[in-house]
Image: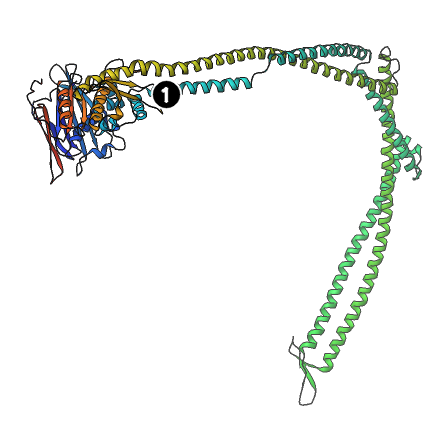
């Protein structure tokens, strides 16, 4: 893979960046990026990573923070590259407050770029963002950090870089699966019931069924006997008919006796005789005579009532006259005032006719009025006496009428009682006739049809019927219980099968747990014995040895790594000192030698990351991204080591392109391509230009 052109618009310190200008492409091999600190060298490498994988590689930063400070509201990146002899470019665009959009274009046969729809970056380049970060990008200070890492830290870093921590994930999954299966086994064991207990329940239930069948047989026999006895009794209809007839005749005779008794008492208190009722015309004649005499008295009483009413009216008129006279007297006394004339005689004017009245004449008039009052009062006394006589005579009439009413009522009661006597006598005879007919028809069925015996038969039949109902209910309950127990046995037998299946599942889980424990043991042994010791460590050492001898001017070679230690003891590194021909721990190396070893180890890791498949789920093909981004890896090295490393990188065929940032002086005999970074201090905007150098053959 070869990056051919880089374009930024409003990306961090660059307002507009095009590398290289015109139709020129970025070449393969080593490209040095130089410039002063804070000029924007690292931004170029970050832009390349951003183009491929977006802002997710930059933890703690959002896409908006990459937009150039100022009024710009959006940023764009174009990254052109050649892959498998095909030309592509990646395009990313984002704005403030909006998400990042990414598109991939491919040049077709007509030299036009066409968008590739529905693509996935990581699938397209066959490398994950995390793996790419560890493979193609060496951060600033990472080499020094790697050179000075302790054994435990270095061991964990290598395990993380090569994704050997997936083994821990596998162990965690196995532990989780073990926990789940153990939990499932415990849950199954909680619901497990010993087969012996179920078999005991079945045996006990079978015995209960046998006992109930015996009781059922006894009750069935007893029910048959009672049913046979009940058949010997008269039918309920016959018994009910006899009971009804006996009850009817009893009620009829009781009522007949009651009416006879009442009739006798009432007859004895009257002036009538039994013979008077035996012939209907006699009673009718007596009633007619009494009614006629009563009506005659009523007529006399009505006539006397009319006389009383007329007399009462006369009384009212007389009282009115008295009130009128009294009123005149009162008015004369209140209105007449006497005056004395010349003759000294007292006189008044009449208020009605205005004639002159003397006092003597006035007194005569008053006397006449008083005489009238006396006459009217005497008349009232006479009328009141007459009314009192009317009342006495009317009371006498009413008393005689009441006596006639009482006699007529008494006769009517006696007549009604006598009619009821005749009615119930006839009814008793009819019922007795019906009873005699019925008794004659059932003579063969009932030996003793007397009322008392019928009552005994009813009681006895009800007793047998109640007992039969109770026995039949008990029979049904026992049948239901037997059927219930049969179903219980079926369920218990199914429970036995279920328990057998449960025990099989528990056994399978025990086998699975045993396999899981062995699998965990094999995984641990595989990681330590095969993955790390036999394969990975050997490849790291061999790849590092390609770099270390050249980087240390031949003093050191033959790196030995022991990664089989624990997390606590970590990685053990030893290297041959060719001056004294012994392997020494890297702890005794000088700072420069450690940094050179760190550089060699880091390049080795990047190289292996792009080639080796440490685990089964690693990419099946080598990643398509094979360039290398180095951010200030040589700062801690002296000029001699820098020169050796640079010359090695120029000759390296491992990576298609190497972008190396440096702010230190480049040895004069190093001839390679360069990107020169500058900055306008008045605006804070960075600029960069590409300088292509003619490579010189290194000896």
| Quarter of the view holding residue 286 | top right
Q: Position of residue 414 (x, y in %)?
A: 87, 35
Up/down of 363 relative to 278, above or below: below
Residue 238 visible in rendering: yes
Residue bearing mark 1: 168
Residue 616 visible in rendering: no
Up/down of 352 relative to 617, above or below: below
Judge left or right: residue 192 versus residue 463. left
Q: In what quadrant of the picture does the N terminus appear?
A: top left
Q: Position of residue 199 (x, y in %)?
A: 63, 11
| Quarter of the view holding residue 666 | top left
Q: In what quadrant of the picture does the C terminus appear?
A: top left
| Quarter of the view holding residue 458 | top right
Front position in the image: 356 or 668: 668
Front position in the image: 642 or 462: 642
Judge left or right: residue 478 versus residue 634. right
Q: For the residue carrying disc 1, how many other residues have a C-alpha within 10 Å: few (<14), some (14-19), or many (20+)?
A: some
Judge left or right: residue 68 versus residue 203. left
Colouring method of the image: rainbow
Front position in the image: 376 or 248: 248
Q: Please, which residue is most extreme toward the front here? A: 580
Q: How many marks?
A: 1
Up/down of 65 relative to 19, above or below: below
- The local secondary structure at tag 1 comes to helix
Front position in the image: 468 or 511: 511
Q: Position of residue 579 (x, y in %)?
A: 20, 20
């Amino acid at each position: 893979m070869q990056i051919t052109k880089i374009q930024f618009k409003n990306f961090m310190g660059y307002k507009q960046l095009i590398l290289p200008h015109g139709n020129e492409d970025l070449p393969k091999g080593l490209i040095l990026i130089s410039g002063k600190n804070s000029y924007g060298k690292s931004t170029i490498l970050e832009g390349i990573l951003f183009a491929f994988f977006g802002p997710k590689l930059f933890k703690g930063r959002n896409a908006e923070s990459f937009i150039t400070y100022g009024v710009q509201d959006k940023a764009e990146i174009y990254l052109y590259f050649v892959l498998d002899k095909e030309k592509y470019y990646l395009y990313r665009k984002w704005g403030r407050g909006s998400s990042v959009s990414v598109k991939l274009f491919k040049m077709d046969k007509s030299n036009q770029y066409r968008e590739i729809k529905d693509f996935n970056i990581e699938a397209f380049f066959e490398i994950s963002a995390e793996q790419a970060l560890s493979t193609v990008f060496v951060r600033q200070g990472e080499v020094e950090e790697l050179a000075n890492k302790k054994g435990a830290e270095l061991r964990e870093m290598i395990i993380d870089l090569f994704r050997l921590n997936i083994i821990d994930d596998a162990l965690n999954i196995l532990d989780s699966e073990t926990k789940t299966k153990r939990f499932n086994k415990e849950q199954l064991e909680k619901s497990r019931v010993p087969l012996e207990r179920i078999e005991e329940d079945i045996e006990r239930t079978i015995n209960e069924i046998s006992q109930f069948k015996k009781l059922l047989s006894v009750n069935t026999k007893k029910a048959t006997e009672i049913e046979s006895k009940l058949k010997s009794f008269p039918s309920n209809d016959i018994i009910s008919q006899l009971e009804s007839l006996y009850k009817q005749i009893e009620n009829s005779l009781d009522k007949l006796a009651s009416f006879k008794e009442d009739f006798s008492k009432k007859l004895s208190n009257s002036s009538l005789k039994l013979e008077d009722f035996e012939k209907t015309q006699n009673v009718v004649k007596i009633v007619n005579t009494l009614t006629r005499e009563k009506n005659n008295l009523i007529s006399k009483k009505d006539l006397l009532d009319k006389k009383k009413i007329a007399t009462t009216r006369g009384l009212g008129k007389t009282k009115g006259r008295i009130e009128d006279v009294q009123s005149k007297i009162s008015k004369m006394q209140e209105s007449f005032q006497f005056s004395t004339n010349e003759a000294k005689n007292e006189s008044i004017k009449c208020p009605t006719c205005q004639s002159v009245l003397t006092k003597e004449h006035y007194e005569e008039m008053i006397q006449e009025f008083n005489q009238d009052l006396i006459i009217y009062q005497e008349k009232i006394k006479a009328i009141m006496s007459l009314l009192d006589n009317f009342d006495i005579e009317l009371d006498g009439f009413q008393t005689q009428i009441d006596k006639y009413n009482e006699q007529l009522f008494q006769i009517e009661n006696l007549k009604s009682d006598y009619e009821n006597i005749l009615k119930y006598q006839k009814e008793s005879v009819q019922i007795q006739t019906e009873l005699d007919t019925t008794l004659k028809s059932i003579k063969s069925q009932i030996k003793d049809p007397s009322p008392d015996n019928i009552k005994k038969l009813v009681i006895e039949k009800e007793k047998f019927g109640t007992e039969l109902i109770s026995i039949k209910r008990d029979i049904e309950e026992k049948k239901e219980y037997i059927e219930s127990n049969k179903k219980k046995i079926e369920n218990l037998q199914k429970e036995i099968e279920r328990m057998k299946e449960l025990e099989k599942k528990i056994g399978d889980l025990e086998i699975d747990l045993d396999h899981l424990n062995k699998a965990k043991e094999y995984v641990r042994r595989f990681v330590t014995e095969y993955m790390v010791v036999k394969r990975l460590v050997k490849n790291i050492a061999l790849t590092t040895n390609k770099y270390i001898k050249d980087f240390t001017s031949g003093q050191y070679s033959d790196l030995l790594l022991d990664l089989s230690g624990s997390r606590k003891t970590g990685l053990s590194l030893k290297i041959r000192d060719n001056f004294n021909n012994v392997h020494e721990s890297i702890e005794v190396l000088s700072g420069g030698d450690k940094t050179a070893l760190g550089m060699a180890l880091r390049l080795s890791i990047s190289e292996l990351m792009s080639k080796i498949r440490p685990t089964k789920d690693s990419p099946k093909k080598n990643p398509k991204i094979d360039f290398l981004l180095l951010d200030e890896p040589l700062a801690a090295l002296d000029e001699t080591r820098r020169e050796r490393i640079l010359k090695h990188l120029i000759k390296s065929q491992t990576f298609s392109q190497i972008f190396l940032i440096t702010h230190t002086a480049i040895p004069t005999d190093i001839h390679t391509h360069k990107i020169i970074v500058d900055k306008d201090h008045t605006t804070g905007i960075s600029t960069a230009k590409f300088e292509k150098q003619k490579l010189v053959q290194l000896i």
